[in-house]
Amino acid sequence: MSTYSLSDGLASGAPHLSRAPWRASWVRDSGAGVLASVAWIAFGLSCLWWEDVGDWSRTHSLGITAFVIAAVALFGTVGADYLGSTGRALRQRAPWLVVLGVFLTLWEVATAKFAWLPLPFFPPPQSIIEVYTDDLPKLLDSVFASVKLQLGGYLIGATVGFLTGVSIGWSRAVGYWVHPVLRFIGPLPATAWLPIAFFTFPSSWSASTFLIALATGFPVTVLTWSGVASVSNAYYDVARTLGAKPSFLVLKVAIPAALPHVFVGLFMGLGSSFAVLVVAEMIGVKAGLGWYLQWAQGWAAYANMYAALIVMSLLCSGAITLLFSIRDRLLVWQKGTVKW
Amino acid sequence: MVAATALAEIDAHPAAGAALDIEQVSHAFDIDGAELPVLSDVSISVEPGEFVALLGPSGCGKSTLLRLVAGLDKPRSGTLREDEARITRPHPSRVVVFQDPTLFPWRTVWDNVALGLEAQGILKSQRHRVDAALDLVGLASFRNAYPHQLSGGMAQRVALARALVNDPKILILDEPLGKLDSLTRITMQAELVSLWQRKGFTTLLVTHDAEEALVLANRVIVFSDRPARVKADIRVDRPYPRHRGDPYLADLRRQILGLLGLDATW
């Protein structure tokens, strides 16, 4: 059997590659950026080429902005080598810029220009920009109210849940009394308490804080408890032979060992508390993004609804990002945590 | 491997070993309502500074005896004494190194070694002892590593440092080398002997490896099957470092394997 050389197999392909290697690498590095630029130029043209079917004041500035973004995408990716980490980041995200440009173009054409989508329900991009520029104070007030309510309720719920979970996991007596209550009340969706909470609490704000805390507290309690309960006895044995007192066993063994579970509980609690926040604001509280959504619907101001929805999504995602970065900092000792 | 400063540190604090008296100790477990006896009338008297190996078939109750010596469990009957004082609960003068290193994964190597001093509330003034213990096991450069970054042998060395930093009077070793590869095992056996010779603590080693017992200990106690009774108490009068090929040790090994019912394999 003759020996087979690798280069024989590659020989046919090699000259093809060597003819224009710079062209191939240029397309690989900057192709997406050029395409993104084309997509955003298309978006800009779609804004300016036809007349709007409705009366929107930001169409012209939106078109100009699209051209600016197209220029940034083009020069940023082509000249990325001179822009350091910014250039690299831009190149990496260029495919998403393409998709975004195409999506915005289609959206613009389908709504503002030819009204293929029924109009009051599907507002064009420029009307959402209009909300952000013209209704900013009200929107910011709503954001502030939501953040305040969410933060207060979440911190109370997380703290109480954590302490309860540690106590149940540690003390048999606490477990005996709290566990049945937890099983009875915990699985109930916090929103089911809404009617009762709104007339038993002195204000709708305190009622909502209670409900958000409840929605947060249940998963945090259960996961903290299971985290503490699943700590290997070997850790306690080691600590005890080294002279550890019970307080040391709780604070320096049980809690750090349970922390990965606790963060799963905090994450789940965050998700369910968002739901309660929005419902509470829609029904009882006279402030916040949920209320803004409700208000906008009442006035058939659909652009305001989409604008608020986008802000809400950014806030929720930001909260989860924050939680995960705290977790990554506290749990550096773990291998392979999920990147959010 | 051992830095000179660490040696000086250790010589400055010679920790003498304690005597250990195990008097007519019996113990049993409750398993599904049935009583399972694990130790039956065990009496062993250990001199200060002795290196005693406890050898027996797997599952015979040796590790249970170690837990009683550590004070982690209380015997059903009989008493255990450390230097005349009755053992009722764990104390840092009797430290255990388990088969698994059981390092706390959320603590760095340094913080793991500091555990005992921290638990006793004396870490602030005694930080140098942690550094000395890490030097002693040759892992000073890994002080900021996390346990998941260590090999099995390194992790067990950290566990050893975590025990030694407390200057124990009795070091309790529960098959600490059982899960290591054979090369690391031989290296660490030699390190154990030199640490014991230098520091003078009393050592109790549970193992099911007759050769390991004979290379390390100056007394080998052979246990019967469960419930464990003392079957033989063998003095090993050979100077250190010992050689595995020593005919005297080979002869003892044959005797011990015979006691364990394994003479047919020879």
Image (spheres, rainbow, N blue to C red):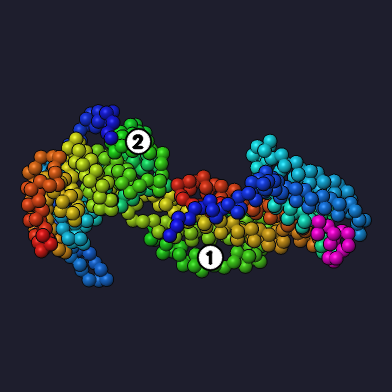
Q: Position of residue A296 (x, y in %)?
A: 80, 59
Q: Categorize mark 2 by other alpha carbons within 10 Å: few (<14), some (14-19), many (20+).
A: some
Please indicate whether residue A80 sits to the left or right of residue B122 in the image.
right
Task: Give the chain letter at badge 2.
Answer: B
Please indicate whether residue B87 sits to the left or right of residue A280 in the image.
left
User: Closer to the camera, A14 or A85?
Assistant: A14
The residue sitting at 42% across, 62% down in the picture is A175
Q: Does the magenta stretch include residue A107?
A: yes
Main SS type for the magenta part?
helix
Task: Give the chain letter at badge 1.
Answer: A
Q: Does the magenta stretch include residue B99?
A: no
In the rendered image, which residue does mark 2 sit on?
B140
Give the residue type at disc 2: Ala
Q: What stretch is highlighted in magenta?
A: A105-118
Q: Residue A186 carries which label?
A: 1
Instruction: Reply above or below: B138 against B178.
Output: above
Q: Position of residue A112 (x, y in %)?
A: 87, 58
Give the residue type at disc 1: Gly
